[in-house]
Image (cartoon, helix red, strand yellow):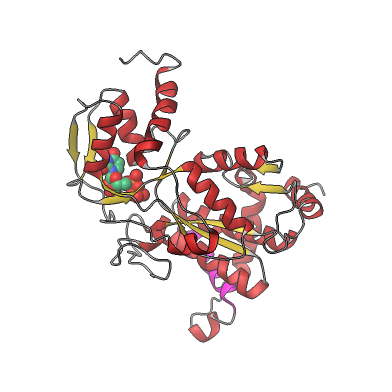
Amino acid sequence: PANPIRRVLLETRNVGGKVPLGVRKKNMRIIVTGGAGFVGSHLVDRLIARGDSVIENLAHHFGNPKFELIRHDVIYHLACPASPVHYKFNPVKTIISFLLLFLFLFLLGFHKTNVVGTLNMLGLAKRVGARFLLTSTSEVYGDPLQHPQVESYWGNVNPIGVRSCYDEGKRTAETLTMDYHRGLGIEVRIARIFNTYGPRMCIDDGRVVSNFVAQALRKEPLTVYGDGKQTRSFQYVSDLVEGLMRLMEGNHVGPFNLGNPGEFTMLELAQVVQDTIDPNAKIEFRPNTEDDPHKRKPDISKAKELLGWEPTVSLRKGLPLMVTDFRQRIFGDSKDRDA
Ligand code: UDP
């Protein structure tokens, strides 16, 4: 076929095919969207190392042709069923109808990616009979009222806040994934990923671990938002990749929390960064962002039991590995430049 995406998909079907439950075919052909990103690049490394063929990062193909396609779908489904009796009858169509609104309102990139991107990839999985893994997020729990968070907790999400495009986008993506699974028999897996750090993380993307590490290396103050008593649980990237692969190759749909249960306040994290990089690093308090979750810690009993997975790299062990990478990227090869 002339369309490069379609050609890739057909090749995927021919070579990779449908993966029997619990069995991993040798030398699979795997599509990784976001394969050039932080977690994706580590995942691609591992898949290639064990002999799989990886077609990475289709996202840039999603431009015109894909949006054209969806625009047509959306126009066809203008009359969106609003009654639960009706929308439960065809949940996938219901959500597609909402896309009309999303597109017209020019919602932020995140929501578009989550909803439209997930829809594209699910359609693709359906066409080629591939198994589909959704990387969802701990953000689906919002500002959680249950602690630690178990997968059965439905969360506490503000639907109209500044984080909503992400939280609700991922929640919608989970809904779509389960609807495709139940309604069309697509094999799916859902991971809810908690805060993850490691080498190759974007230096200036504004996440707390990358900020603190870059700031300490550059001799800038560590910016603690709010009172610094909010908590997060930080997972080293190789633990996450292991969890994603086990999930993809196992028999359970999920959702599964994939995160490290070691919980830290932001002030404690700043302390670990000081201990690791520069004990004299200053702390500077800044106003916190709106709707910032107060606490976050995964309950990983389900992943332990059903995937045989748990993290092995503590924050104090993982952080130095990230620091080495950041040091090289910030200062070039000279290790002693900031000494
Ligand atoms: N945070 C901080 N200083 C920073 C960046 C973030 O104190 O320079 C805080 C932020 O307010 C939040 C926590 O760190 O409470 C985690 O933020 P991040 O953006 O890394 O992840 P998320 O909020 O998505 O869990």
Total numbered circles: 0
Visible residue check, residue 106: no
| Residue 75 locus on image (x, y percent) | 60, 67
Q: Residue at x 39, y 66 (%)?
A: 150
268 and 159: which is toward the camera: 268
Which image quarter holds the C terminus? top left
As displayed, is residue 84 above or below residue 151?
A: below
Q: Residue at x 70, y 59 (%)?
A: 23
78 and 256: which is toward the camera: 256
As displayed, is residue 333 above or below residue 97?
A: above
Task: From the viewer's perspective, tell me whether residue 301 is left or right of residue 7.
Answer: left
User: Could you say which quadrant of the image residue 278 lies in?
Assistant: top left
Q: Residue at x 68, y 41 (%)?
A: 50
As displayed, is residue 334 above or below residue 325?
A: above
Task: From the viewer's perspective, tell me whether residue 73 is left or right of residue 318.
Answer: right
Splitting the image into four quadrants, where does ligand 1 fall? top left
Q: Which residues are magenta?
A: 90-106
| Residue 115 locus on image (x, y percent) | 53, 59
